[in-house]
Image (cartoon, coloured by chain):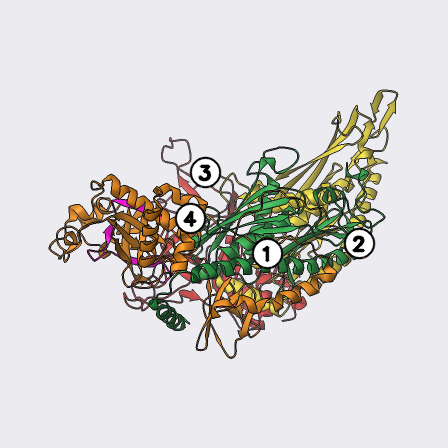
Amino acid sequence: MSATVLPGTGVPAQRVNLKLGPGLLQNRDANEAGPSIITTRAGTLNHSANGSRWWVESNSRRYVPAPQESVIGVIVQRVGEGYRVDIGSAHYASLDSLAFEGATKRNKPNLKVGSLVYARVSLAHKDMEPELECFDAQTRKSEGFGELKGGFLVKCSLKMCRDLLDPKHFLLPLLGARFPLEAAVGMNGRVWVSAKEPRQIIAISRCIEAVDPDGGGLDEAGVKALLGTLDV
Amino acid sequence: MGSRVEILNDGGFRSDGRRQFELRDMTIDLSQQGQADGCAVVTHGLTQVLVSVFGPREAKMRSQTMHDRANISVEVNVAAFSTGERRKRTRGDKRILELAATIKSTFEPVVQTNLYPRSQIDVYVQVLQQDGGLLQACINATTLALVNAGIPLLDFVCAVSGGVHSTSPLLDLTLLEENDIPNVTVAMMPKTGKVTLVTMETRLHVDRFEEIFRLAGDAGKVIHGEMKNAVRSRTSALVAAMGSGPRVGGVDVAADKDGDDRMNEY
Amino acid sequence: MRPPSPSIPEKEFLVASLKESLRLDGRLPLETRTPILTFGPELGWVECALGKTRVVAEVEGKMVKPTPERPFEGSSRYTRRYRPWRRASTSPVGRASDEEVTITRMLDKVLRRSDAVDKESLCILAGQRVWHLRLTLHFLSDAGNMLDCACLAGIVALKHFRRPDVEVIGDEVTVHEPTERAPIPLAIHHTPFCFTFAFFPDPSIPPVIDPSQLEQRLSAGLLSVALNAQRELCVVQKLGGVPLDPDDVLKIVSVAVQKAKELNNVVDARLREDWEARKVEVT
Amino acid sequence: MITFTSFPVPADDTYNGAHSHHPDVSEDVLMDLDDDQDPLEAGGSKLTYPGESLTSSQAYMRGHGTYVENEEVIASVAGTMERVNKLVTVRAVRTRYNPEVGDLVVGRITEVQPRRWKVDANSRQDAVLMLSSVNLPGGVQRRKLESDELQMRTFFEEGDLLVAEVQAFFSDGAMSLHTRSLKYGKLRNGQLVTVPPVLVRRLKSHFIALPCGVDLILGLNGYIWVSKHVKASDQEGEEGFDAEAVYSNQNDYIDDLTRIAISRVTNIIRVLAAHFVPLTDTLLLEAYEWTVDQEGGAKDLLQEDVGDALVATITARL
């Protein structure tokens, strides 16, 4: 199902209605002999069961915004009717102050510079600043997005974030069994965590760093051993 | 070169005739110079520094503004004629950049910058003569210039240099002594006795360090007395000059009005 | 685009946990990260890691003609390569940031001005030939406290380095290849180590040694102490920042005295271990 | 003790303390200082220096120029302490201009921005003059059009001087100005003098017409405009609003005598400011008469002895 690929490898994706994910490029001026689709990243090549979606999975630390991904950002500036938000990408994203649940012209959320927000990328175009929203544009409900108060922000690799979002991943359930915790995972390499005691938050943060494939790469048994030393 | 000179002779005198703990002459000139909002010329013996303060004023570079407090920028210029050996130091000189960064971070926690959001306070330090104790002169002059500009400070910052010759501590070193013996500069805030700046280079035993460190802290209080006197007499001279003008009836009313306004602010 | 300052929750959490004497990486306030020293195949190549902060130091020696003013002394030069973390600095391109200036000046004071290396022993033939040492420091990654890491890498590299043996007969200088005669270590007067402490504006927060990147950015002042295991201070540097009680400063100094002794033992042990391993290779 | 004298000792109001101290005697010195306090309390108000503790924070409230630490109210500036009931404030002797609503200020345009001008008014931040706060040609009640935004530089451009009133404050403390009165607007036919703002006291009117054919505008921010006298009839009535004249960059014809009078007034202000004497209309008038009696040229005033004599005479008379 998956194979390790290097940039420039030809991909045997053949389908009428083909969707290419990150790390793949259609070779437009390919002649008859050359492959029509090539990889642009090193990583593992994956495809959906019916072969209609293909993508390359790799690990990196720099976030490239893509529409509909949830991210965690830091407010860096207030500009007129909105905010500029650092989401770890090459450019700051903009967040309109009306893009919150229940926000009206009169009643806008008041975020300070330095606040954390959990938001969704609503627009990511290569020639434009990315745009964020803190609600679902159709229902106008918050859906869990909005300002994150208290807690702590852990930075990790992008792969780690994707792993944490996988419901089958062991880490969060393992920690959750020990003490109650809240977590918001952004696709941009940032995880916000909160628990009752500072020492518990520190434990979560250290576990995430230890499990991160870019750092310690610990497995479940290793984390259990680590947690044993942490006194939580 | 210094080894031929006796730092402290048998009679207990130093090369310029001072005793161990004697400070050099300190003169302070707080008179108005040019368009600066505040300035001070401070002389410690043959070391002389002129500091001019401008601001708080609109920041020239928008990238330097901070939304919650004022930015302090410090520029140090060492006159080419200030040392025996005439040489021009460029602005990129690491030693000068360090000096400027030191002055900036010394005053950042002392100046009440949070009263002036989005503004900038510019401090220009002009070193006119150097004979040891450059950092102490810069710090003392900057304190006085800021006070003179009416910028709110939590306290004075008073700096003194010191050194140890074999086992005897000395205060307020000249260039000759500075080159020869381990030296320390300490800047303290006299109200609380807390130390904002300590620098020491060259090797010194921990116990000796403690001795000179405490001594320099005490000497800072003497410097504080001098600085306080200077500020007092400058203030009273200005107040006296203002009093010489006619008192218009509206003034006192205005003062009361100010008071009310301010009460509302808090 | 300058990097944004840490967010409010990060700041509040750090302050709250430090008040309980908890640090994010599980250390005690006065506990350093254990340095990991990795020696390269060549003598004088050391990689020093404090957590994720990494600095590589390498020493090269070559023979040059001494300067006319100091015919009996060898010379040394330090080069620093900051490139990888320049990105994170806040200053405009081309001008050194404050942190860069501090580190540069501090390295100069700790390694050169404290006379760690005996310069006269680098003389081969007075006025004719002396050794010139070049120490290059490569800053690979910054996870806080680059200064201590760089100082440690520098001094260990100098201790690790060995120069080829030289024989002088009359005016004739013969350099012996390492295969002929065992190379000679440098004459080191003393081994200064640097310790950095971070202070916070809230007086109820204890000072922390060896601050991490977040601690360093949120701190309100740093105090660096460089000293050797013989209780001799080389540099004490607190450039502004939050004012401290004189007794607190002296307490910090005595903590550093203790740490220097421990670190000296660790470094000596590592150097000996490495040297033993090399001996086996030769025979 | 060897005394080195490096530069000639500066004159009068500078402080010179050439003492050497020994730490053993430092205690005495400090005590002396504390004893000195009483004579300094001349004029009824106490003089302070930064870091001086004034009173307990439980009995009093802290005002400007002070802060509270360890239940003490402590001065943060050097100046005079004032007490209004329970409120303790310290007014710095020399400081930048602290604006209040209704103040009359003279300023200089530093930047033209969308729908607003930035104005340097000697304060801690540049003031803002909104396009909606100025009178535009074609009637006072006229609506602002987009075309006005495009030709903002025809009203005010960088470097222009203007007189305005402080209208309000923004949340960050920057002041907003307005020129919606025929008294306010662009300045011409004269020159600017800068004095420390504290020397300009609040007066009934800050527009002063001296009998020598010179008009003065005393901006509370320390900027003073000295210009040729304009007949009052020119300024009357809202119908008389002449955009050409208000936003003109062209000086009127100024004869030599007026020019000399303008420089004389300017120099008087400079001399008084150098001696830190607060400015009022009567004072300026007296000073002007005195200088005319002395038969010196306008430039002689800037000589130190003439200046000292002027200040001595004027202050003695009042």
Which chain: orange? D
Q: Is residue D174 magenta?
A: yes
First-in-chain label (2 vs 1)? 1
Which chain: red? A
For badge 2, the amino acid type reads Arg
Q: Is residue B17 magenta?
A: no
Question: Gap in Å between the C-alphas at discs 2 and 1?
Answer: 26 Å
Residue C35 in the image: state x and y as whole percent.
Answer: 71, 52
Q: Which residue does the numbered mark 1 point to in the structure image?
A: C216
Image colour assigned to chain B: green
Secondary element at image label 2: loop
Q: Is residue B60 toward the left or the right of residue C130 in the image?
A: left
Which chain: yellow? C
Chain of the residue under label 3 = A
Quadrant showing the N terminus of chain B:
top right
Chain of the residue under label 1 = C
Q: Which residue does the numbered mark 3 point to in the structure image?
A: A10
Can I make out residue A98 in this image? no
Q: Is residue C133 toward the left or the right of residue B68 in the image?
A: right
Question: Gap in Å between the C-alphas at discs 4 and 1?
Answer: 56 Å
Q: Nearer the viewer, residue C167 or D245?
A: D245
Q: Is residue D8 toward the left or the right of residue C130 in the image?
A: left
Chain of the residue under label 2 = C
Q: Which residue does the numbered mark 4 point to in the structure image?
A: D307
For badge 3, the amino acid type reads Gly
Q: Which residues are magenta?
A: D170-194
Residue C231's disc number: 2
Q: Kindly report which numbered mark, 2 or 1, lies closer to the viewer in this rendering.
A: 2
Secondary element at image label 1: helix
